[in-house]
Image: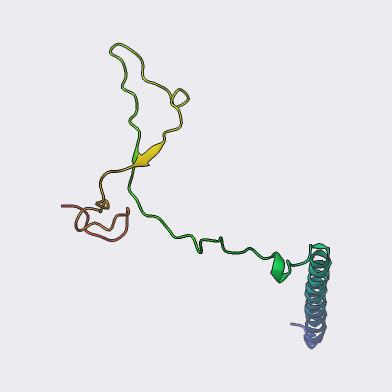
Amino acid sequence: MSTEPMQLAAPSGLMSLALFLVAVAVLAMLAGGFWLGNRVKYRESLRPRPEEQPKLPPGGAVHEVRENRESEEIPLMPKGGRPLTPYELSNQQTRPSASTDRPRWSQGSSGSFGGGGLGAH
C-alpha cells in the first residue's frame, strides 16, 4: 500500500473548468440564436397597416352550409371486359343528396378504431 495522500483536488478542479466552459458555450449559442433571429426578423416585410387588413364581404360574414353529399357511381364493368384502373376513372364528383338525415355510427360504437367503445353487436 502506498502512504501518499490521494489527490482529489486536481480532478475536481478540472471538472469545474469543463462545466464552466460548457456553460459558456451554451450561453454563446443562445446569444447567437437571438442575434440570428433578430437579423431574420428585420429582413421580413412589415406588418400590414389597419387599412390593409382583410375586410368582411358586403353581405356580412360567410356562414357554414351543411348538406349531405352523394358520390357519383363507378361505371359497371362490361360483361367479359376488364376492370377500370384508377387512371381510367375521372375525378369522382359529388352532388347534393336528397336525404336530410345525417349518417350516424352504429349504436354502441365510438366511430373510430380503438376508440374504446364496445363496438357494434
**Seen in the image, is 19 located left or right of residue 77?**
right
Residue 37, image quadrant = bottom right
Looking at this view, name the residue that lies furthest to the front: 58
Q: In this view, does 75 lie above or below 45?
A: above
- Front position in the image: 117 or 105: 105
On the image, the x and y values in percent for residue 70 come to 33, 40
The residue located at (19%, 56%) in the rendering is: 107
On the image, the x and y values in percent for residue 115 come to 31, 59
Residue 54, image quadrant = bottom right
On the image, the x and y values in percent for residue 56 come to 57, 64
The residue located at (24%, 56%) in the rendering is: 109
- Front position in the image: 77 or 11: 77
**Seen in the image, is 14 located left or right of residue 72?**
right
The residue located at (40%, 55%) in the rendering is: 65
The residue located at (25%, 53%) in the rendering is: 105
On the image, the x and y values in percent for residue 50 come to 70, 71
Tell me the colour scheme of the image: rainbow
Quadrant (top left/top right/bottom left/bottom right) for the N terminus: bottom right
**Seen in the image, is 27 located left or right of residue 66?**
right
Residue 20, image quadrant = bottom right
- Front position in the image: 116 or 104: 104
Looking at this view, name the residue that lies furthest to the left: 121
How many numbered circles does the render carry?
0
